[in-house]
């Protein structure tokens, strides 16, 4: 019968120990020694010595004992280490073990024996070992074992330098830094107290030269008996939780020392430790602080607890019970902050209004500023969470500017409001005030230029633009606006048949246009000026040159048709361009031609131009044919955005559909397609399309496409307040089955 | 955002000039090319409190941080260090010596 093999595998090392062959044991002993596996080496040598008491094996055993003693000492097991060191003497060990023995005796608190072994062997000790032992004795003496001094000869540096270092330490503890410095200077470099001297010097520098102090601390060797002291004392440079964290890892005596030297009460330290160990929730912090309020200045702890209420509103009752009612101001302000965090905007709005009333009761300069800030905050809540078309918005912004006129964003917000509400007169007045307040601000000036251009006050626009160009010479928007101002003025002059003045305006526009940036528009105006003067040949030459700059003939012709209609010029020469435009639009489109045309159309988009609308009719087919060309996604998005703005639904739908072929399910293009299909009227969407637009919104939210979300929201809800948290970390809160 | 006063190491009552100085000192210690994250935080802190208006806005609208660092700053601050009793020093040294690990290699 075959016996089953034991499944337990024998470890190779176990196999070796089972062998008693001397050669194998010797090899094992030597390998263990080389790898500092002292216990194994001791075992191997003991086995070898049982076979034959050879001197080299005995020596090997003593080395292994010495190694094991050192290993135990390194782990702080000094008494155990001493047992091995004693065994060495029994073996008649010839090796020097005095240094290790001294250190172990000293650290095992066998002081007198330690001194005896040290003094007996001092002469034979290598200098480095002697220095380390002296430093250990010195640390022991400073740690309260002064009786050790009596065992040393009077001339020993441990004795002679004890007095100055002790006095320096006492002087430092007493705050007599001058004396401490003087005494530290008397301690020589090779002193056993050298590391303590360095540490005290560093501590003396800590407040005046932290870098130098750090450098001195770094000189303390990690093996120095004073290294632990250094680790505690350098914590003085830390503060707050960092300090708390570091101190909490120290032993009890070191913690007591660190807390005392930090200048804080033990109980305060205990409280913060409890805070640190706990859940650190607002509730727990509030309760702990309220329970230990007596440890702090009443006013400060009251403020801290009040601050915590904005994160732990349920603590309000306890707060009132312990500290009494907060001031009306604090009460309303904390309520407002809590409401904002809970997204309760009605309550937040009402509470901030209350704060505004309270602040307004005391008319100080600071309170006026506070009132302005609160009014702006209220305007912001109104605009973001209620209605942007409410008079309340205007009231708060106007009120805030009355108290603090130096606030550009409020002017811009107010201008935006007036623009949206078609309050032209108020817009103009507000703009005048804004320009007066910020005569050199680019945002305000840019707005002012646009307004002046829209109102056909060209000189004003040109004047603002010149100021802005002086401040920001390479601003392309300003250059464009200034050129537009001159061209508008030139058109006015052509219409009034003041041709020389039109020429002057065009020359000014030419001077502003940067080289290589020409779109041909100035030359087209020159062409029209020539036609108006009956100079057909010059006019045609100008327009031909403009075509090259415009990127295509089609673009130049479109511009000629639009600009001519704007100045009511309908000469035979001009009429030929209507025909040319139709002819060019019948050709096959290419990407460059389409993009050049789009740029030209886009330049009119701001101007709400009826002539453009008519001209677009002539190129609509051409544009649609070009929808399937190979556009980048950004190009396609920009094109769609422009047709959305122009409300050219037919063209927009074609482009969006082509875009969706390339970028399937892209929420932006899904929106454009449905927006175009319903001609911008969400009530015309069919049930299936409603689902699609909802899907597009959810997808845009998932992808954090804020702009798309806003577009869809504006389309579906007609700019009702957008109270969906954009960023959408709480996307799951959005109920998928919610009725629209 | 961490407490901007804390981050710049200034008192809440500090004026524009003091805050600017503290900001510039911090920027020198954490230049944008070497410590971009720290610089961003310092810049944000400075923007939050650089003018009286900004400080008032901070006072009105910031939601206090619920953390131990803020409580420490508010309740304890940075008290002037005290010199401990020499007896405490002695006890601390004795304790650290108990935890001392002998570099036995240097003594063998």
Image (cartoon, coloured by chain):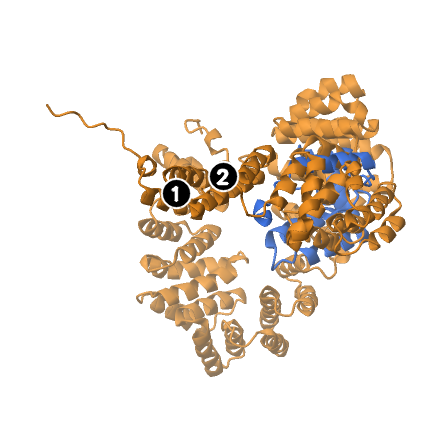
Chain colours: A orange, B blue
Residue labelled with disc 2: A713
Q: In 3D space, how far apart are the residues under numbered discs 2 and 1 (Cα atoms)? A: 13 Å
Quadrant of the rendering where the C terminus of chain A is positioned: top left
Foreground: disc 2 or disc 1: 2
Q: Is residue B76 visible?
A: yes
Is A8 positioned to the left or the right of A344 in the image?
A: left
Q: Measured from the top left, where is residue A6 in percent x and y?
A: 23, 27
At horizontal 45% and vertical 45% (from top left) the residue drawn is A60
Question: x and y percent of residue A100 in the render?
Answer: 61, 43
Question: Relative to B96, is A667 on the left or the right?
Answer: left
Residue A467 higher or lower than A109, as above or below: below
The residue sitting at 87% across, 40% down in the picture is: A364
Q: Is residue A733 left or right of residue A260?
A: left
Q: Identify the residue under disc 1.
A: A674
Which of the two discs, 2 and 1, labels the residue nearer the N terminus? 1
Quick one: SS at disc 2? Answer: helix
Identify the chain of the residue marked 1, using the numbered disc in the image. Answer: A
Residue at point 34% right, 66% down? A590
Residue A73 position in % (x across, y down): 58, 39
Pick the residue in front: A324 or A532: A324
Q: Check disc 2: other Cα within 10 Å, few if <14, some if 14-19, many if 20+.
A: some
- Quadrant housing residue A312: top right
């Amino acid at each position: 019968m075959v016996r089953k093999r034991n499944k337990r595998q024998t470890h190779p090392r176990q196999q070796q120990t089972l062998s008693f062959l001397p050669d194998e044991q010797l090899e094992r002993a030597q390998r263990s020694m080389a790898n500092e596996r002292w216990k194994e080496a001791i075992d191997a040598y003991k086995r070898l010595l049982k076979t034959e008491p050879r001197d080299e094996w005995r020596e090997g055993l003593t080395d292994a004992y010495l190694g094991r003693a050192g290993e135990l000492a390194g782990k702080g097991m000094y008494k155990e280490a001493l047992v091995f060191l004693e065994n060495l003497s029994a073996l008649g060990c010839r090796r020097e073990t005095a240094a290790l023995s001294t250190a172990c005796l000293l650290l095992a608190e066998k002081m007198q024996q330690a001194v005896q072994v040290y003094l007996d062997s001092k002469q034979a000790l290598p200098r480095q070992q002697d220095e380390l032992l002296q430093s250990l004795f010195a640390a022991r003496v400073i740690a309260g074992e002064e009786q050790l001094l009596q065992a040393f000869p009077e001339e020993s540096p441990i004795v002679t330098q004890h007095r100055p270092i002790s006095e320096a330490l006492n002087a430092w503890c007493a705050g007599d830094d001058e004396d401490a410095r003087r005494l530290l200077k008397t301690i020589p470099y090779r002193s056993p107290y050298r590391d303590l001297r360095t540490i005290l010097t560093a501590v003396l520098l800590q407040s005046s030269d932290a870098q130098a102090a750090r450098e001195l601390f770094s000189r303390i060797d990690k093996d120095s008996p004073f290294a632990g002291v250094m680790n505690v004392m350098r914590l003085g440079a830390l503060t707050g939780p960092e300090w708390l964290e570091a101190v909490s890892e120290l032993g009890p005596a070191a913690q007591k020392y660190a807390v005392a030297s930090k200048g804080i009460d033990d109980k305060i330290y205990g409280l913060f430790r409890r805070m640190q160990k706990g859940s650190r929730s607002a509730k727990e912090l509030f309760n702990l602080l309220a329970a230990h309020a007596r440890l702090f200045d009443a006013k400060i702890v009251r403020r801290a607890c009040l601050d915590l209420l904005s994160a732990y509103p349920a603590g309000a009752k306890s707060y009132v019970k312990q500290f009494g009612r907060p001031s009306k101001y604090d009460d309303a302000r904390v309520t407002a902050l809590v409401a904002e965090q809970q997204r309760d905007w009605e309550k937040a709005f009402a509470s901030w209004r209350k704060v505004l009333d309270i602040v307004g009761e005391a008319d100080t300069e600071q309170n006026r500023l506070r009132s302005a800030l609160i009014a702006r905050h209220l305007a912001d809540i109104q605009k973001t969470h209620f209605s942007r078309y409410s008079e309340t918005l205007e009231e708060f912004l106007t009120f805030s500017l009355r108290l603090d006129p130096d606030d550009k964003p409020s002017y811009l917000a107010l201008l935006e409001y007036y623009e949206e509400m078609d309050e032209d007169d108020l817009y103009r007045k507000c703009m005048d005030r804004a320009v007066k307040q910020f005569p050199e601000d680019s945002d305000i000036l840019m707005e002012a230029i646009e307004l002046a251009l829209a109102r056909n006050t060209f000189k004003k626009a040109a004047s603002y633009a010149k100021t802005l160009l002086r401040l920001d010479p390479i601003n392309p928007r300003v250059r464009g606006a200034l050129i537009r101002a001159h061209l508008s003025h030139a058109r006015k002059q052509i219409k009034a048949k003041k041709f020389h003045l039109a020429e002057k305006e065009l020359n000014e526009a030419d001077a502003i246009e940067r080289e290589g940036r020409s779109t041909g528009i100035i030359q087209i105006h020159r062409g029209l000026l020539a036609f108006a003067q009956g100079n057909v040949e010059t006019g045609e030459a100008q327009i031909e040159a403009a075509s090259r700059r415009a990127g295509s003939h089609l673009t130049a012709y479109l511009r000629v048709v639009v600009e001519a209609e704007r100045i009511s010029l309908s000469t035979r020469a001009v009429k030929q361009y209507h025909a040319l435009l139709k002819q060019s639009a019948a050709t096959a489109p290419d990407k460059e031609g389409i993009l050049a045309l789009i740029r030209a159309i886009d330049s009119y988009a701001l101007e709400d131009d009826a002539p453009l609308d008519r001209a677009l009719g002539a190129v609509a087919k051409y544009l649609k044919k070009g929808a399937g060309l190979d556009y980048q996604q950004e190009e396609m998005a920009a094109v769609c955005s422009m047709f959305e703005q122009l409300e050219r639904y037919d063209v927009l739908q074609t482009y969006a559909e082509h875009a969706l072929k390339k970028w399937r399910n892209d929420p932006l293009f899904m929106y454009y397609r449905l927006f175009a299909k319903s001609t911008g009227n969400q009530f015309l969407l069919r049930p299936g399309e409603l689902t699609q637009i909802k899907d597009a919104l959810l997808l845009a939210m998932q992808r954090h496409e804020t702009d798309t979300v806003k577009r869809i929201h504006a389309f579906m809800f007609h700019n009702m307040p957008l109270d969906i948290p954009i960023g959408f970390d709480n996307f799951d809160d959005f109920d998928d089955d919610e009725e629209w | 955002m961490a407490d901007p006063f804390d981050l710049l190491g200034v008192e809440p009552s500090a004026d524009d000039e003091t805050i600017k100085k503290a900001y510039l000192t911090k920027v020198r210690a954490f230049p944008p090319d070497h410590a971009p994250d720290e610089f961003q935080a310092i810049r944000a802190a400075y923007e939050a409190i650089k003018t009286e208006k900004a400080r008032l806005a901070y006072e009105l609208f910031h939601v206090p941080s619920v953390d131990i660092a803020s409580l420490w700053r508010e309740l304890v601050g940075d008290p002037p260090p005290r010199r401990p009793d020499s007896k405490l020093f002695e006890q601390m040294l004795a304790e650290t010596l108990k935890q001392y690990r002998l570099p036995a290699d240097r003594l063998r």
